[in-house]
C-alpha cells in the first residue's frame, strides 16, 4: 500500500428535521448565526434559530453574506461576533455562508490576523465551536477545512487548514426541498466536479478519498436530473445531499484541480455561481487531461455510463466526458461563456488570472500552462 494520510471530516447528523435538533451540541452562551438575506427572507432559518433561542442561547444573526463572499463581509461577520461576545458559530446556507462561518469561527477563536493564515496548513490556532448546516447539495463546504474569500481585484484566496473543520455537520434534506432548478443544477454539477477531481488529484489521491468519490459520483449523477425535474422528491434530495457531503470529504483530502482553477476567475470577475463556472470549464479541462488521466477517467466511466463496460479505455473516457457534458445541458445550465456575456477577447486575461491558482493547478493530472488556459477559455467560448 502506498503511504497516505486521510483526515476525517466533522461528526455527522443526517435526517429530515435534524436542523432543529442540534442546539445542545453547542456550549452555553451567544451564537453567531451566519446565513444570507435570501434564506432569512424565505423563512428557511426560522425553525433552527427558534430552537437555538428556546435552548437559552442568544442568537446573533449575520445575514449579509453574498455569493463569492468578500473580505469585507468576512471582517464584518467577525466584528459582529466579537461585539456580541459569541461562544460558538453556526453556518447555515450554501457554500458562501459556510465559508464565512468557518473562517469567522477561526479568527474569533484564535485571535489571528487574516493575512497571516492564507494558504495551506498555516492556520494552527483554536477556533470557536462550529456547526455547519448546508441548504444546497453541492459545495460540500460543511465537510471541508477550506474557506475561499474574494479579495481585491476579484482574486479568490483560501485558508485550507484542519482547524477549520467543523465539529458537526447537519444534513437535513427538508432544507433542500423545492430548491429552484438553476440552484439544484449548479450545485449538483459542482459536487460532481469535486468527485471527479478528487479521484484524479495528482498529489494526494488515496484509497479512502477514491471510495468516497466513486460513491459520491454514483449518487449525484443518478439523482441530479430527478432533483431538477421533481424538486420535492425527498429520496433524490437525500441522495444529492449525501453525495455532495461525500464528495466534500473526498476533495478535502485529495484536492480539486484544473476545472476549479479555471472556474475561479469567471466567478471572481463575472460573479457567476461557482457551480456554473465549473460547468463551463468541465468538458474542456477533462479533454485536456484525457490522456494523462485516461486510466482514472476510464475507471469512473461505468459509474456514469454503465453501458460502456465493454469499451476500451479511450472510448470510456470519451463517453464519460460526453455524458457529463449532457448532464450539464440537460440540467438547464447554458454551456458557453458567450451565454453569460463574456467576450472571447477576455481569454488572455482570464488565463493570467487562472495561473494565480497555484494551490489548485498543482493537483491537476497534467500541466496547464497559461497558453493552455487561454486555449481552454477560447474553446469554452
Image: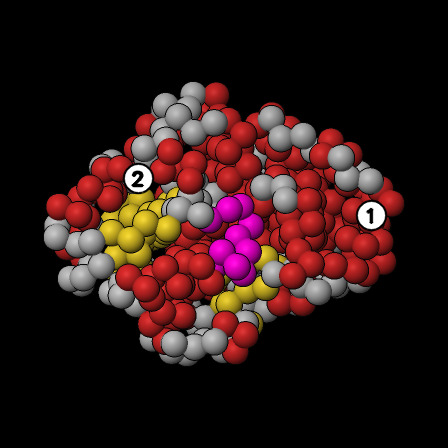
Identity of the residue drawn at 24% across and 51% down: 59
Q: Is residue 66 magenta?
A: yes
- Residue on which disc 2 sits: 45
Identity of the residue drawn at 59% across and 69% down: 203
Tell me the CA gap for discs 2 and 1: 40 Å
Under tag 1, what secondary structure?
helix
Could you say which is closer to the camera, residue 182 or residue 43?
A: 43
Q: Is residue 50 toward the left or the right of residue 375 in the image?
A: left
Q: Quadrant of residue 131?
A: bottom left
Which is closer to the viewer, label 2 or label 1? Answer: 2
Q: Main secondary structure of the magenta part?
A: loop
Percent of width and height locating residue 3: 48, 75
Identity of the residue drawn at 63% across and 41% down: 272
Name of the residue lying farthest toward the front: 83
How is the model colour-coded?
Answer: secondary structure
Give the answer, above or below, for where 83 lies relative to 372.
Answer: below
Q: Residues within 10 Å of mark 2 (few under 14, many from 20)?
A: many
Give the answer, above or below, for where 363 lies relative to 263.
Answer: below
- Residue on which disc 1 sits: 346
Percent of width and height locating residue 161: 45, 70
Give the answer, above or below, for where 143 lies relative to 190.
Answer: below
Identity of the residue drawn at 64% across and 48% down: 267
Q: Quadrant of residue 258?
A: bottom right
Q: Residues within 10 Å of mark 1 (few under 14, many from 20)?
A: few
Query: Which span of residues is magenta-colored?
Result: 65-74
Say whether marks 2 and 1 touch (CB < 8 Å): no
Q: How many marks?
A: 2
Could you say which is closer to the camera, residue 325 or residue 14?
A: 14
Amino acid at each position: 500500500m502506498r503511504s497516505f494520510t486521510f483526515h476525517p471530516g466533522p461528526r455527522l447528523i443526517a435526517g429530515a428535521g435534524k436542523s432543529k435538533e442540534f442546539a445542545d451540541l453547542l456550549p452555553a452562551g451567544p451564537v453567531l448565526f451566519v446565513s444570507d438575506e435570501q434564506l432569512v427572507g424565505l423563512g428557511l432559518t426560522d425553525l433552527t434559530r427558534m430552537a437555538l433561542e428556546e435552548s437559552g442561547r442568544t442568537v446573533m444573526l449575520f445575514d449579509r453574506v453574498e455569493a463569492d463572499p468578500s473580505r469585507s463581509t468576512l471582517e464584518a461577520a467577525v466584528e459582529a461576533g466579537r461585539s456580541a461576545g459569541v461562544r460558538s458559530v453556526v453556518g447555515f446556507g450554501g457554500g458562501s455562508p459556510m465559508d464565512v462561518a468557518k473562517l469567522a469561527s477561526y479568527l474569533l477563536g484564535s485571535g489571528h490576523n487574516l493575512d497571516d493564515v492564507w494558504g495551506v496548513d498555516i492556520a494552527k490556532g483554536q477556533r470557536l465551536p462550529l456547526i455547519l448546516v448546508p441548504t444546497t447539495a453541492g459545495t460540500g463546504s460543511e465537510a471541508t477545512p477550506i474557506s475561499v474569500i474574494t479579495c481585491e481585484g476579484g482574486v479568490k484566496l483560501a485558508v485550507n487548514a484542519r482547524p477549520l473543520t467543523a465539529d458537526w455537520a447537519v444534513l437535513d434534506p427538508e432544507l433542500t426541498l423545492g430548491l429552484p432548478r438553476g440552484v439544484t443544477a449548479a450545485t449538483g454539477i459542482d459536487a460532481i466536479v469535486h468527485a471527479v477531481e478528487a479521484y484524479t488529484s495528482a498529489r494526494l489521491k488515496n484509497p479512502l478519498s477514491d471510495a468516497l468519490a466513486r460513491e459520491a459520483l454514483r449518487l449525484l449523477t443518478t439523482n441530479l436530473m430527478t432533483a431538477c425535474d421533481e424538486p420535492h422528491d425527498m429520496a433524490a434530495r437525500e441522495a444529492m445531499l449525501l453525495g455532495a457531503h461525500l464528495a466534500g470529504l473526498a476533495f478535502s483530502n485529495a484536492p480539486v484541480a484544473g476545472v476549479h482553477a479555471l472556474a475561479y476567475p469567471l466567478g471572481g470577475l463575472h460573479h457567476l455561481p461557482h457551480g456554473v463556472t465549473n460547468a463551463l470549464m468541465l468538458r474542456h479541462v477533462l479533454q485536456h487531461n484525457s490522456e494523462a488521466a485516461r486510466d482514472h477517467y476510464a475507471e469512473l466511466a461505468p459509474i456514469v455510463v454503465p453501458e460502456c463496460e465493454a469499451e476500451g479505455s479511450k472510448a470510456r473516457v470519451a463517453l464519460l466526458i460526453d455524458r457529463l457534458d449532457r448532464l450539464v445541458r440537460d440540467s438547464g445550465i447554458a454551456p458557453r461563456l458567450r451565454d453569460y456575456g463574456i467576450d472571447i477577447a477576455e481569454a488572455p486575461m482570464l488565463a493570467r488570472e487562472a495561473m494565480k491558482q497555484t494551490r489548485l493547478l498543482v493537483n491537476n493530472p497534467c500541466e496547464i500552462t497559461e497558453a493552455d488556459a487561454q486555449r481552454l477559455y477560447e474553446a469554452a467560448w
